[in-house]
Amino acid sequence: MELTPQDKSSEQSESIEAGDKERWTSLIGGGAMVLMGLRQRSLRGVLMAVAGGGLLYQGAKNKAL
């Protein structure tokens, strides 16, 4: 059975949800990175906080990478 272009586009538009383990890892790890980054008060700390914020966002939205 061959997929039609409409079927292919619907498969690509579906979001992939993260599992509970991945979600909690992102939330805890991202939170730790934000806190550590803010404590450093340097460019490196800002970059770490931004990266941690991305992990927090991913965990909060329940999306897989």
Image: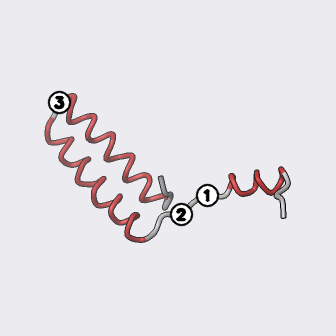
Task: Residue at 42%, 59% (x, y): give it.
Answer: 59
Crowding at mark 3 (Cα within 10 Å: few <14, some 14-19, many 20+): few
In the rendering, at what x and y percent does residue 48 appear? 26, 40
Secondary structure at badge 1 equals loop
Crowding at mark 1 (Cα within 10 Å: few <14, some 14-19, many 20+): few
* Quadrant position of the N terminus in the picture: bottom right
In the rendering, at what x and y percent does residue 63 appear? 50, 58
Residue 16, relative to residue 34: is it above or below? Answer: below
Q: Which residue is mark 2?
A: 17
Q: Which residue is mark 1?
A: 15
Q: Nearer the viewer, residue 12 or 32?
A: 12
Task: Residue at 40%, 64% (x, y): give it.
Answer: 23
Q: Which residue is mark 3?
A: 42
Q: Nearer the viewer, residue 2 or 37?
A: 2
In the rendering, at what x and y percent does residue 29 appear? 28, 56
Pointers 3 and 1 in contact (CB under 8 A)? no
